[in-house]
Image: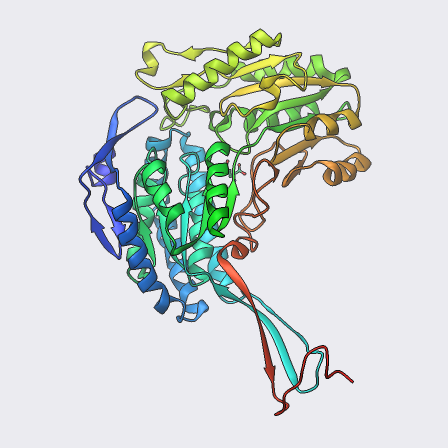
Amino acid sequence: MAEALLQAEKLKNFIGGEWVETQDSTEVTNPANGKTIVQVPLSGADAVNTAVEAAKKAQKEWALVPAPRRAEILLQVGILMKERKERLSQLLTMENGKVIEEARGEVQEGIDMAFYMSGEGRRMFGQTTPAELPNKFSMSQRAPVGVVGIITPWNFPIAIATWKSFPAIVAGNAVVWKPATETPIMAYELAKIFEEAGLPKGVLNVVFGKGSAVGDAMVHHDDIRVISFTGSNETGRNIASECGKQLKKVSLEMGGKNAVIVMDDADLDLAVEGIIWSAYGTSGQRCTAASRVIVHEDVKERLEERLLVEMEKLSIGDGLDESNKVGPIINKAGLEKIKDYIEIGKDEGAKLVAGGYVLDDDVYENGHYFAPTLFTDCTADMRISQEEIFGPVISLIPVKSFEEAIEVNNGVEFGLSSSIFTSDANRVFKAQRDLDTGIVYVNAGTTGAEIHLPFGGTKGTGNGHRDSGVQALDVFTEWKAVYVDYSGKLQRAQIDTE
Ligand code: UN1
């Protein structure tokens, strides 16, 4: 099936508009069954250098194409993605494991981003503003940065790529992109779509390979002026410190330890639905996934009972089977990490009430499946309540008040997403003010960000930048202030004002 859908056995890099073969490669396996899908190139610094040269050359001309014309290519990309939505979704499920319904949602997120960013080609507003001197005009406008590097993760291999590459391209930059080696097919397909949509050669370059080779070469390349990265905290910190030394702009989106708060006045059935969806959907492998439930003690028992009932109903298996709601974990390393946290939680004295084990019956073949897991009676400072597990594991923490709930929510290193279920309007407004996260949901789970709003988080989640939304343009542009003096004489600012 993969062969028929993919029409390639070995992927190639896309550099300067050419499909370039590499010597080394490694296999990409389907996390649902361990079967090989395709070979992905393992490139080195040479390929990055060639890609940057191609990008530099292309960018000079691309920057001179009027933004509304650049945007037309994005519009065409969106149309082609829409036409191919089902095929892309199936390939996404095969390489990433997420269930097909969610894969369709992710591809849709990319389509939305294409249509949204193509509109930005006719906006990209700067400001005109009065000058302080007579017969003088002043304005600000966005200018492209040049060549930008984007490094994207396996958990949203197409959506996150569109959040970064589309604003970069519409703003007049050229891109060198390193996709995750676990999920290269979405990158290959998106590059093909760009090629068909008529993007000039060299504006988008895809270099497959490991972070330690390709990513490292990108971070160290003098001519890449921006790095936009989504991935682990450790890698992000290393990238930031390296970029800091070079005064390279860097935008980071890293981990989360997102919580759903359930107050005593909440609609409990709705809260349970929100928790199940945001904690166990995508097997908990979203940066935005809920991994803590902070519950008012008066409703703790009722919430727990209902959660256990709904967890029982979750069918787990290959995401291509429409009846499954929870797919596999990306790979063995991911599975091992989750297993380790189960032991940590038990040792810390948390009560394991459901799940906590690997599913390895015959029906799961060589896939990596983990049972949806619920720890209860957790305290806020346990490691399982503090650290990102990236799997279908909830730590349920009872609290006595609204104020304590907010404090527990904010008492972690990360600040990506948070949610509160309550029917009290005063609490709604206090919570959206006091929850220290980049994304806040009221009466919904912690996932479900829309592309025209800024995506990112506070504290250890990032470094103050945002993906998607109009804010993404700030990552990929410089602000330029322009003064035009039409007085015909020298007017000195701040001096000749009398
Ligand atoms: C991620 O987990 O890194 O809000 C991205 C959401 C999705 C995007 C998640 N729209 O969960």
- Looking at the image, which residue sits at the far bottom? 488
- 176 lies left or right of 274: left
| Residue at (43% x, 48% y) in the render | 162
* Location of residue 119 with respect to 210 vertically, above or below: below
**Place of residue 3 in the rendered image (x, y in percent of width and height, measured from the top left):** 21, 35
Q: Determine if residue 355 is in view.
A: no
All told, the count of numbered labels is 0
| Residue at (40% x, 35% y) in the render | 154
**Place of residue 279 in the rendered image (x, y in percent of width and height, measured from the top left):** 55, 25
- 215 lies left or right of 271: left
- Looking at the image, which residue sits at the far right? 426
* Location of residue 312 with respect to 450 vertically, above or below: above
Q: Determine if residue 156 is in view.
A: yes
Quarter placement of the C terminus: bottom right
**Place of residue 217 in the rendered image (x, y in percent of width and height, measured from the top left):** 34, 45
* Location of residue 474 with respect to 428 vertically, above or below: below
**Place of residue 468 in the rendered image (x, y in percent of width and height, measured from the top left):** 52, 49
| Residue at (21% x, 37% y) in the render | 4
Q: Nearer the viewer, residue 149 or 322?
A: 149
Q: Nearer the viewer, residue 29 or 196?
A: 29
- 102 lies left or right of 439: left
Q: Nearer the viewer, residue 86 or 55?
A: 55
> By what rule are the colours in the image chosen?
rainbow
- 330 lies left or right of 351: left
* Location of residue 477 with respect to 13 vertically, above or below: below
| Residue at (64% x, 90% y) in the render | 487
| Location of residue 173 by image quarter | bottom left
Quarter placement of the N terminus: top left
| Location of residue 263 by image quarter | top right
| Location of residue 272 by image quarter | top right
